[in-house]
Image (spheres, grey):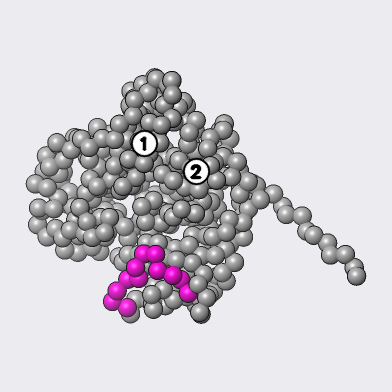
Amino acid sequence: MKPSERPGAVLGDGIDAPVPAHYGSPAREQRALLAGTALVDLSHMEVVTVTGQDRLTWVHSLTTQHLTGLTPGESTETILLSAEGRIQVPAFVQDDGETLYLITDVGQGEELRAFLQSMKFMMRVDVALRDDLSLLGGYGSETVPRAILTWRDPWPAVPASSVAYGADPDQHPARGHDRYLALVPAADLEAALDEWEGTMAGMLAWEAQRIVDLRPRPALDIDDKSLPHEWDWLRSAVHLDKGCYRGQEAVARTVNLGRPPRRAVLLQLDGSAERLPAAGSEILWGEKTVGKITSAGRDMDEGPVGLGLLKRNTPLDAQLAIDGIPALAEVIVNPDGRTALSYDRPKIRKLAP
């Protein structure tokens, strides 16, 4: 039985319209997700595959992650950047020894495929956007029936090759949550769900958990100005010691000098409002626009929450409003925009008159 045909299924809207938003109780579904007993239909996400003997060294040279030593079954993620270091297409990455799988968010697979295809030159690779593969999401260590691979989210770990702009892994809200994406042949999706011994959860539950885990979603949270630093995304997607790739100089400059112009925040929204603010709505501090909300959801414990971007110098205790709804911002990225690798800024002495 298809996810959309299962009892209680209610389809979503916007970019998540093709899959169920919930099955009757988003809060209960979120608890089942974290308990490892529920799956989410993510079949609207997209998969690009790269085959050929140069696949790892080639994608390594084009994106932010160190991939030449990637072992079969190892999970990581990478980002395709613009020359200015702005985020274009992030991808979850796994190789099975013959094929490199690049999992992208809704509507981003073709952009990645087209870019890779344009950069083939004499490389021994083949690139394809796959419509014969589907994705299911979950938490825990369960094995999804008929999965050909399982990508396990490295977030919020910080390897020695990178750096964090936010909380240490052992203090991060996402610690120990073990999120995964299971790749299943599209033809086997219904059979896989029939064989699954747990329940189903919808996108409302999946998104609420993603937000409180402070995990940015490319199709919602990223705009044409986004830097990895603003979202604390270096921790899992950017290798700072690898060779040259497009956007590397801009990444290094911001790490060294610090102070990206914006910073991600977790927004605690006034629970008395029955609605959630629309993604993209301005964040106001008094009458001044200081940022925008990028995602919103209802968490089973914290209630209405969102992710957003604020101007870096917005006060930590600022009383904010979004689409008429009062909000407070909790720190994700350090307000000073610096890491352990940022240089100390020399103080400029003022000359006496």
**Which secondary structure, mark 1?**
helix
Q: What residue is pinned by disc 2?
A: 82
Q: Main secondary structure of the magenta part?
A: loop
Q: Is residue 283 magenta?
A: yes
Residue 16: image quadrant is bottom left
26 or 2: nearer the viewer: 2
- Apparent side of residue 266 relative to residue 162 in the rendered image (left or right): left
Q: Is residue 3 magenta?
A: no
Residue 267: image quadrant is bottom left
Coordinates of residue 151 in the picture (x, y in percent): 33, 39
Within-10-Å neighbours for mark 1: few <14, some 14–19, many 20+: few
Residue 277, compared with residue 232, is above or below; it is: below
Residue depicted at x 72% and y 52%: 344
For the record, the magenta segment spans: 273-284
Q: What residue is pinned by disc 1?
A: 114
N-terminal-most mark, 2 or 1: 2
Q: CA distance from mark 2 to mark 1?
A: 14 Å
Q: Is residue 134 visible?
A: yes
